[in-house]
Amino acid sequence: MQKLDKLYEGKAKKLYATDDPGVLWVEYMNQATAGNGAKKAQIEGKGSLNNRITSVLFDLLAARGVDSHFVRRISDTEQLVRAMDMYPLEIIMRNTAAGSFAKRYGVEEGTELKQPILEFCYKSDDLGDPFINDDGIVALGLASKEELDEISRQARAVNDALRDIFSKIDVQLVDFKIEEGKTSDGTILLADEITPDTCRLWDLRDGSGQIEHLDKDLFRRDLGNIIPAYEEILDRLEALADAEGVARRVTLA
Ligand code: UDP
């Protein structure tokens, strides 16, 4: 597989074409951002940790029947994925009240929700990713009703599978953001990344009674260094994948 032109550079990843039009080359960067890019830092080791975390998560999900765009990991910081037309949506699932949801409704962070909540935001840096509901998505033509039904079904399936995965490594899956896209043959699939940048993960092994963040809130809220927390997540996920004998899609040069 040959790496060709750079197609896109985001806040945390660079995307390249390859000699196969159906496959893209993703490079994870060390950059961390928060507040729509208002806060920015280079954090040595972050790109490699997120590349490895999202790769093992896509393998653990596949073993649970949840497909994604992931093809295989090819180095510490790089992976191959299927080329997709992305929906301009941030798809958020919440199991526990936190962050913007806790603020918006005046509930204490950590309050368990009686059922998972699926939320959508319209992905637009200029507009600050505003909240949008199902009717708004269809009315603006961001996805058809049928596509949105499938996206919603997949988001709930991802939540069920991720909750199972994280409960097995003593981590509370508070909430997370995913993105979905469509391949050239019309298949709707989970895409982008699933990492501690995009999930709220609280340690259940910590007996202090206080919330122990193993995610980007450490950076967003100036609570500490993210690297040991991300390493802890990777170590526990790798141990789970080994224990479950999950097939790993990795070919290192
Ligand atoms: N999230 C994300 N990217 C965004 C916004 C949110 O990955 O641009 C994730 C975030 O890490 C959390 C979940 O989505 O796990 C819900 O975030 P929330 O809406 O509470 O926003 P925040 O409080 O982070 O602004």
Image (cartoon, grey):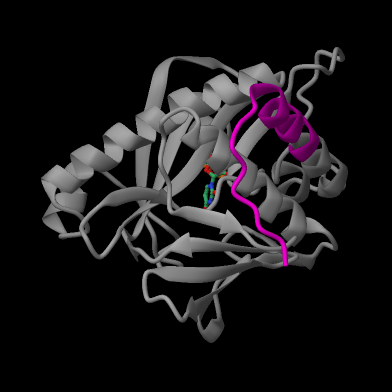
Q: Nearer the viewer, residue 154 or 125?
A: 154
The answer to whether residue 187 is above or below residue 164 is below
| Residue drawn at point x = 40 percent, y = 41 percent | 67
**Left or right: 179 as drawn, with respect to 6:** left
The answer to whether residue 207 is above or below residue 60 is above
Q: Nearer the viewer, residue 31 or 39?
A: 31
Residue 229 horizontal/vertical position (percent): 81, 39
**Left or right: 198 as drawn, with respect to 118:** right
Q: Is residue 162 visible?
A: yes
Residue 200 placement: quadrant: top right
Residue 166 placement: quadrant: top right
| Residue drawn at point x = 71 percent, y = 63 percent | 75
Residue 4 horizontal/vertical position (percent): 53, 86
Would residue 78 be counted in the magenta stretch? no
The answer to whether residue 174 is above or below residue 22 is above
Q: Nearer the viewer, residue 161 or 118?
A: 161
Q: Nearer the viewer, residue 35 or 229?
A: 229
| Residue drawn at point x = 31 percent, y = 58 percent | 87
Q: In the rendered structure, which segment of residues is drawn in magenta?
A: 234-253
Ligand 1, image quadrant it occupies: top right
Residue 179 horizontal/vertical position (percent): 41, 51
Quarter placement of the N terminus: bottom right
Q: Is residue 11 visible?
A: no
Residue 150 horizontal/vertical position (percent): 23, 39
| Residue drawn at point x = 57 percent, y = 55 percent | 72
The answer to whether residue 217 is above or below residue 94 is below
**Left or right: 2 as drawn, with respect to 251:** left
Q: How many marks?
A: 0
Would residue 245 be counted in the magenta stretch? yes
Quarter placement of the C terminus: bottom right
